Image (cartoon, grey):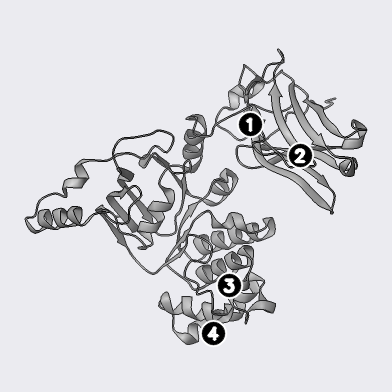
Amino acid sequence: MTNAVIKVENISKQYRLGQVGTGTLSHDINRLWHRIRKKEDPYLKIGEENDRTAGGESPYVWALQDISFDVEKGEVLGIIGRNGAGKSTLLKILSRTTTPTKGNIKLKGRVASLLEVGTGFHPDLSGRDNVFLNGAILGMTKPEIKRKFDEIVSFAGVERYVDTPVKRYSSGMYVRLAFAVAAHLEPEILIVDEVLAVGDMEFQKKCLGKMQDVSEKEGRTILFVSHNMGAIKSLCTKGMLLEKGRLSFVGETNAAINKYLRAGLVESKGYYKNPSPRLESDILEIKVLGKDSNISERFAFDEEIRIVFRLKVSQKHFDALLGFRVRDQLERNVFTSQVPINKFVSRAGEHEIQVTIPSSILVPNRYEIVVGFHKVNVETIQFLEAPVQFVIEETGTDFFQYAGNDYGCVFVDCDWQ
């Protein structure tokens, strides 16, 4: 017998581009006339697939089409997909902040949602007042909220500012308090969008730990949207993949992640060009080069990878550092490397600096680099989040027999005796 607390049946959501509602009075009247006669909405027969990369002729777009799934009590469902795949639209429907165009949802229990920074907060009220306001909205009594209040404020780390209007909070403080309220007021269903990315690493870890406790120890259900595959893998008991508004897969978490990554839904690119460089110093170009010195995105396990940075450097930044961090498809940091600019640069102007990643170290996987051009603790000249990516392909290495397993990030040829 099923113990589903969320049951979604053939949910679809249609939007008219550039309009609120159907956009015209004639369309509204036409829809009403069809509804009175118990006929199908005429505008449901038109509309195009939600492909943000392609143009179209119809003003109607299906953000979601025929989505059906169940979530059991205590499950943590990770929802993944490209930007524009329909993840946030689905969460808004489940949170009842918007209605589906067609289909039905059934929810058992109280729902707490954290969809974007400041959801449900009144900017002119203090943090204290917003805790009580949110608690009341969730159906909690005042004594219940009082009992949890100190724990909420402590978790959020905003004790000093609890009586300050939240409009004066930073986005990170906003999210900390909003998450603390949503997680501590004991909802049966907790819905969390990508907002945790606003917080610092320590707080993100704290949030993931709290969600794990809420699920495992309290038996509550969580829906979690994130682009961080490491967080999805560690937290979620089930995964769901959306692609262009349609349900592509729902099932075991690792299978959902692998399908997402292997279907080419994460693009690779071996070249970056700065569209608007700063006047003094900046990163102008980044190229990932293969053995033929051509820009490449795919490499064999036994190939070296060369990364060339073209920089503009002013005299005041000769003492800056250029560094990069390699990150794998699960958002794990593999290694970091940096170099002082003055090792190569002694005059102002444009310069190329090259770094080589040795062969036979990075295991077959998909990688991205995070780049920083900075003066330590003084100035960030440029910071680029994944401007280039590359793939180490499986070319018959010893790892082939472990396909589908997580065997780490690097291969180390240790001294065995």
Secondary-structure class at tag 4: helix
Residue shown at 63% from the left, 67% from the top: 173
Q: Quadrant of residue 299?
A: top right
Secondary-structure class at tag 1: strand
Label 1 to label 4: alpha-carbon separation: 49 Å
Amino acid type of the residue tagged 2 in the rendering: Asp
In the displayed structure, 48 sits above or below 96; it is: above
Say whether disc 2 or disc 4 marks the residue closer to the N-terminus: 4
Residue at numbered disc 4:
146
Q: Residues within 10 Å of mark 4 (few under 14, many from 20)?
A: some
- x and y percent of residue 145 in the render? 51, 81
Label 2 to label 4: alpha-carbon separation: 51 Å
Residue 85 in sight from this viewpoint? yes
Dot in front, 2 or 3: 2
Secondary-structure class at tag 2: strand
Q: Residues within 10 Å of mark 1 (few under 14, many from 20)?
A: many
In the displayed structure, 228 sits above or below 35; it is: above
Residue shown at 38% from the left, 34% from the top: 55
Residue at numbered disc 2:
282
Q: Residues within 10 Å of mark 2 (few under 14, many from 20)?
A: many
Say whether disc 2 or disc 1 marks the residue closer to the N-terminus: 2
- x and y percent of residue 394 in the render? 61, 21
Residue at numbered disc 3:
167
Q: Is residue 143 left or right of residue 385?
A: left
Amino acid type of the residue tagged 1 in the rendering: Gln
Dot in front, 2 or 1: 2
Residue at numbered disc 1:
389
Amino acid type of the residue tagged 3 in the rendering: Lys
Dot in front, 1 or 4: 1
